[in-house]
Image (spheres, rainbow, N blue to C red):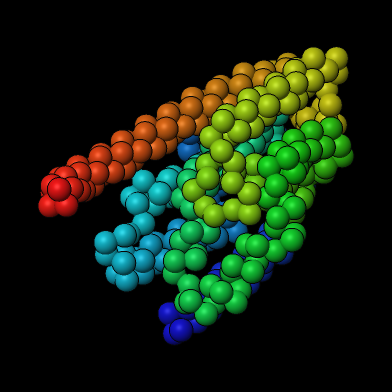
């Protein structure tokens, strides 16, 4: 119980710290003049390293490391697999690169850069975090009392059953992507840090819901069979393609921010927008294709494993039958 209490106190402190940093983050000035990169080295070294992003990511990494260590000590024969641990860390690293690297520095300057940032969050970071299986880790590190009284009831709650239903999670992800790019939210996020952070949280949250049933690493109210996972991803590709195509084909710039921004370098706002649409179109399709190939590979591995277990069961049944037959023959001989 003391271990769980320490975990809860740390989580509460981390949440309070993140909230305070979010509230005191300075808003971005509306429009203005874009920074001018003097050289390639200026671009490569343009890391933001903001505390309200760094500290939550660091806290999340440390909490995961602590929880994995607890599982390793209490269950040395069944620790958290290394690939899950590294997948979690890699997902956090992708978020750091998307938000704090030059990609994050110039996301309000170039729409194409902004689109790369969004693709990293929803198509790379989210599935990597899902492979890390944080829900499973939470259930394993929690005390039996809290697991039965708090976490399992939440996992089986009606709200989570609705939100985690694959049709709903797929639709929510598609709705967030389309609504954010074709509403005033996008322009507002470019002008204000509060809304920008909320937009990133919305993207990442909807993407985690989307990838949860596909990865299948964590327990879920709904379990997708492997063929359905492939179909789920296959249906996700067209909506991403159509979104990129819609942005690419727009006859004029969609966002006032990029039009009114004073920028003496780079492509025009319309060309920049076409690049962004192309990145969403081609990049989204590429990520979905990779995901489908991996889903097929996992499906084949599962079928191979199931076949091997069936063969082993058949061998055991045949061996048991072979042991029974001689005994039965001897009994028949004695009766005669």
| Residue in the picture at 31% in, 67% down | 75
| Residue in the picture at 20% in, 44% down | 325
Residue 205: x percent and y percent? 66, 49
Residue 309 visible in the shown view: yes
Residue 202: x percent and y percent? 71, 48
Q: How many marks on residues?
A: 0
| Residue in the picture at 46% in, 84% down | 1
Dividing the picture into quarters, in which one does residue 181 lie?
A: top right
Foreground: 81 or 227? 227
Residue 222: x percent and y percent? 63, 49
| Residue in the picture at 84% in, 32% down | 182
Dividing the picture into quarters, in which one does residue 301 lie?
A: top left
Residue 101, above or below 244: below
Residue 116: x percent and y percent? 61, 30
User: Viewed as shown, does residue 66 lie left or right of 123?
Assistant: left
**Residue projecting furthest to the bottom:** 2
Foreground: 51 or 160? 160
Dividing the picture into quarters, in which one does residue 286 lie?
A: top right
User: Viewed as shown, does residue 161 lie left or right of 301?
Assistant: right
Residue 124, above or below 164: above
Foreground: 141 or 297? 297
User: Viewed as shown, does residue 235 lie left or right of 49?
Assistant: right
**Residue projecting furthest to the front:** 336
Residue 181, above or below 72: above
Residue 117 visible in the shown view: no
Residue 230, above or below 49: above
């Amino acid at each position: 119980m003391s271990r769980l209490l320490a975990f809860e106190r740390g989580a509460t402190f981390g949440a309070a710290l993140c909230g305070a940093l979010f509230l005191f983050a300075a808003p971005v000035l509306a429009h203005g003049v874009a920074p001018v990169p003097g050289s390639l080295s200026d671009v490569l070294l343009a890391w933001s390293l903001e505390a309200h992003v760094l500290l939550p990511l660091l806290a999340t990494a440390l909490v995961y490391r602590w929880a994995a260590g607890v599982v390793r000590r209490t269950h040395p024969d069944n620790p958290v697999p290394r690939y899950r641990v590294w997948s979690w860390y890699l997902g956090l690293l992708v978020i750091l690169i998307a938000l704090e690297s030059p990609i994050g520095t110039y996301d309000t300057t170039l729409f194409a850069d902004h689109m790369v940032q969004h693709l990293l969050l929803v198509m790379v970071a989210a599935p990597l975090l899902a492979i890390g299986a944080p829900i499973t880790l939470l259930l394993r590190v929690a005390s039996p009392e809290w697991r039965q009284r708090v976490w399992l009831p939440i996992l089986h709650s009606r709200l989570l059953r609705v939100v985690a239903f694959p049709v709903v999670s797929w639709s929510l992800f598609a709705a967030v992507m389309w609504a954010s790019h074709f509403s005033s939210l996008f322009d507002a996020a470019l002008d204000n840090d509060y809304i920008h952070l909320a937009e990133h949280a919305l993207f990442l949250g909807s993407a985690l819901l989307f990838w949860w049933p596909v990865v299948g690493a964590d327990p879920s109210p709904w379990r997708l069979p492997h063929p359905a996972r492939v179909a789920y991803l296959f249906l996700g590709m067209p909506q991403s393609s159509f979104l990129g195509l819609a942005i690419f084909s727009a006859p004029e710039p969609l966002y006032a921010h990029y039009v009114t921004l004073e920028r003496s370098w780079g492509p025009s706002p319309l060309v920049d927008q076409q690049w962004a649409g192309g990145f969403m179109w081609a990049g989204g399709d590429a990520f979905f294709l990779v995901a489908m190939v991996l889903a097929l590979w996992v499906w084949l591995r599962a079928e191979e494993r199931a076949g091997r277990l069936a063969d082993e069961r058949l061998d055991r049944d045949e061996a048991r039958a072979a042991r029974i037959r001689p005994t039965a023959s001897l009994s028949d001989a004695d009766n005669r």
